[in-house]
Amino acid sequence: MKSLHLLCISLIWGILFGLLACQQPPQASERPHKTSVIAYYAGDPHAVDQYAVGQLDQIIHCFLHLKGNKLALDEANDSIGIANLVALKGRNPELKILLSLGGWGGCETCSDVFSEASAREEFAQSVLDLLLKFEADGIDLDWEYPGISGYPGHAYKAEDKQNFTYLVQELRQTLGESYEISFAAAGFDSFFVKSIEWDKVMPLLNRVNIMTYDLVSGFSKITGHHSPLYSTEEQVRSTHRAVSFLDSLGVPREQMVIGGAFYARVWENVPNINNGLYQPGTFKQTVRYSSLNDYFAANPGFELYWDESAQAPYAYNADSMWFATFDDTRSIALKTQYARKEQLGGIMFWQLATDTPANGLLEAIHQAK
């Protein structure tokens, strides 16, 4: 009888523990992972509502610049553009709208201004004033680049690295915890090492938007993939390389957002070797994704190729000796799946205005999620 009594007690406790186990929160690996989708927007302020904003978590208005020490509007269209973006919350109440500073060629005085504590304080207060005025949700810093050479002729110095930390600290202190703060990071090693004090700034930020495009830029004299997912024997720079490097520096994966390119880069005078890939040439132009098929049709002779190693498309025209590198629906879907698999914060892209309003790259991201 005693053994039967103990057996009954054991069964009861087993059932209770089983019920409690069912009520425990899932482990981190079992929790649903949110892959945020973030769009930069630098297009017509009246045209943004044609896009599928319900598929976006965040839109970043591009760009505002420094006027003295303050973040300032450049023209009336900035006010219209920001107001129209904020109005999109009527269609997507979860959507967040961020303002942005800088961009390529848009941070000429950043090194000097952010060297002074009083200027950083004035800047942070100006950011808060604009966020309150427009009922926006945060700030994205696009300083290209602290501590290393960026736009030709723009000042930079080694102290920018620490001053960027001070800038982020001032912004977080002024804005509090309710506003978003992010920044756009270049996708190459020298930026990772020389521009940012990662261990100090990431605890204060919501995310880092890694510009894993332009990895072969307009200054490059050799063709390659400008937005590849993986490195190849011929090209080290890639999305995976950037993620792995930042991971080695201790940057939390859930704060990393990888970038997609909604545009192509075209080179000319490229010899007909290896279908133009990794060959000498001269940068010719960029082409919007929405115009890419028309561009190929207007220049007969382009052949499309897929690089299995890089997981990236490219095109070559042997008649004109033109080479093109870009993201397409296949490569952008693979990047989105990569972000999910690697438990990253999400995927962003430059930029929404160069997509087709329907059945474009945003739709491919949405379907891949």
Image: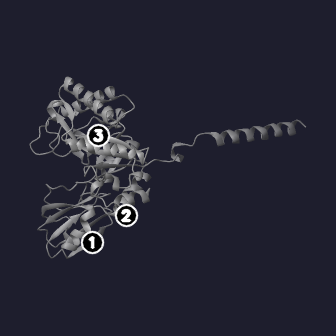
Task: Judge whether 328 appears above or below 188 on screen.
Answer: below
What element does badge 2 sit on?
loop
Residue depicted at x 13% and y 39%: 108
Can residue 274 be seen at all in this image of the molecule? no
Precedes in sequence: disc 2 or disc 3: 3
Quadrant of the drawing holding the N terminus: top right
Q: Residue at label 2?
A: 359
User: What type is the residue that disc 1 sits on?
Assistant: Leu
- In the image, which is nearer the foreground, mark 1 or mark 2? 2
User: What type is the residue that disc 2 sits on?
Assistant: Asn
User: Would residue 363 appear left or right of 62 to someone viewing this image?
Assistant: right
Q: Residue extending furthest top?
A: 118
Can residue 33 be seen at all in this image of the molecule? yes
Q: Residue at label 1?
A: 304
Precedes in sequence: disc 1 or disc 2: 1
Few, some or many residues within 10 Å of mark 1 (<14, 14–19, 20+) = few
Q: Which of 73 and 320 is in front in this view?
A: 73
Q: Tell me how far mark 1 sits from mark 3, CA to CA.
A: 37 Å
Few, some or many residues within 10 Å of mark 2 (<14, 14–19, 20+) = few
Residue 169, image quadrant? top left
Q: Residue at label 3?
A: 99
Q: Which of 190 and 167 is in front in this view?
A: 167
- In the image, which is nearer the foreground, mark 1 or mark 3? 3
Task: Judge whether 205 appears above or below 299 on screen.
Answer: above
Total numbered labels placed on residues in the image: 3
Q: Which of 339 and 4 is in front in this view?
A: 339
Position in image of residue 113 (x %, y %): 16, 30
